[in-house]
Image (tube, rainbow, N blue to C red):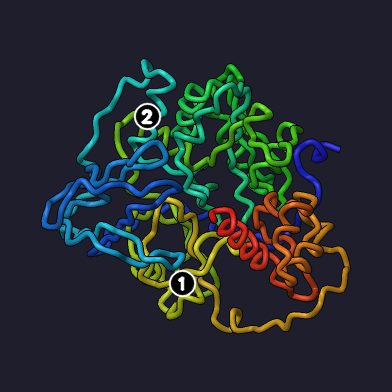
Amino acid sequence: MFWRKHTFARGIHPEGHKSTAGMPIRRMPFAPRMILPLAQHIGKPAVPLVRAGEEVVRGQPIARADGLMSLPLHAPADGVVESIELKPSARGPWVESIVLRVYEASTQEVRWGLPPDVDRLTPQEIAKAIQDAGIAGMGGAAFPAHVKLTPPKGAVIDTLIINGAECEPYLTCDHRVMLEYPQDVIRGIQLALRACGAPRALIGIEDNKLDAVEMLNRHAPEDGSIRAQAVQTKYPQGAAETLIYALTGREVPIGKRSSSVGVLMNNVQTMAYIGRLVPAGEGVIERVVTVAGPDVERPGNYLVPIGTPMRYLLEYAGARSATSERQIILGGPMMGEAVASLDVPIVKGASGVLVMPEQELARNHRIYPCIKCGECVNVCPKGLNPSMLGMLAGRREYETMGEQYALGECFECGCCSYVCPSHIPLVQQFRIAKGVLRERAAG
């Protein structure tokens, strides 16, 4: 069977809700004020380069990276720095942020940039240029892209995997980027190949997006170094280890990184931004975000300035009925999280904003005891035993979960919770267990 080579074991098939896939990307206007958290990536927060009262122009660096695991920040619009203060983040904690008051006459033109001679850049210089552009992984994790493209010492990378699967329901921003910016995607992949030293790249795209497969293969170089490949539409096809297996047949050993099997992986929108920004010597000031859900009057994919308040984006998309944080999911419905406030900003890792009906969220499913039906075991893409992990979590036997049942291998895809007939919040239990173990390990 053809698909046996391009999928993975287990997984689920939730409804796609991909109605925004046919809607072209639309540019958003500037909000009157932008909120720019200094920590929009995994790693150390950026360090401000500006002070309150200072004028900035669109594209200007306003915060510098603080070491290797850090990224700079760039002004998304012309304006004046109003303050540098603590502001709420999507996950709850308040973080230091630059508040920018945008000038009414601010132009969409990027007014800051120093184009390098990209053809002469060494792999290390490409990685540095990616860091200087402030590019974080745009699939949601926001891991600094230059670090992901730097192989560990001694590792030999022969394949760069590009995640264009976009398996989460509702989300279509990566799909539109592949259709509308294919040259940026290919150019970014070419730079990424030079940075990591791999000779080839495979772009994994679910087979409900064959137009994207065709588009990228049409723009790919004739030497075959970059190829888009359709994979079966199944969740979580876009997870790192599942997509690597679907495309290469390689299995990442427990406790190891993908580099141990000669593979590095990045998101397709990340590649598009590398291809666009590095040759121009510019920084990340906007990203494509899917805004969708039953309560959105004008759903679609929007090119949103970084720092745009969630409330402003929702009003622009016609989601005025969204009056509660409970209705808003940042990311996809499977792995996304409810926001802590409607006033949090759009950041580099925000791939989607979903607005769900209040009555849908208000349904309280009674939680029943585990009936040992085995459905969670049947769908877990990692081959874990979520039923046993859940029972151990209920008894707070967290060490046993980690030592004997490989809790650390769970990447919280939500398949187990999705199929559980007893409505047990397994993923939430696993997150709590991981948090407790991290605290205990830290002493």
Q: Do the CB atoms of the residues marked 2 and 1 lie less than 8 Å apart?
A: no
> In x, y percent, where is residue 172?
54, 53
- Residue 305 seen: no
- Residue 339 seen: yes
Looking at the rendered structure, the kind of residue marked 2 is Lys
> In x, y percent, where is residue 191?
46, 26
Mark nearer the N terminus (2 vs 1): 2
Q: Is residue 296 left or right of residue 262?
A: left
Position above or below: 311 against 278: below
Q: Residue at x 32, y 47 (%)?
A: 46
> In x, y percent, where is residue 364?
66, 84
Relative to the observer, which residue lies in front, 118 or 170?
A: 118
Q: Is residue 99 left or right of residue 240?
A: left
- Disc nearest the viewer among 2 and 1: 2
Residue labelled with disc 2: 128
> In x, y percent, where is residue 75?
25, 49
Secondary structure of residue under mark 1: loop
Q: Residue at x 32, y 43 (%)?
A: 72
Task: Give the position of the C terminus as an image quadrant.
Answer: bottom right
3D distance between C-alphas at marks 2 and 1 = 42 Å
Task: Give the position of the N terminus as an image quadrant.
Answer: top right
Looking at the rendered structure, the kind of residue marked 1 is Glu
Q: Is residue 223 left or right of residue 269?
A: right
Secondary structure of residue under mark 2: helix
Q: Residue at x 55, y 28 (%)?
A: 152
Position above or below: 71 against 81: above
- Where, by quadrant of the figure, is residue 96 drawn? bottom left
Say which mark, if any, is on residue 297: 1
Q: Is residue 275 left or right of residue 252?
A: left
Within 10 Å of disc 1 (Cα), the crowding (few <14, some 14-19, many 20+) is some
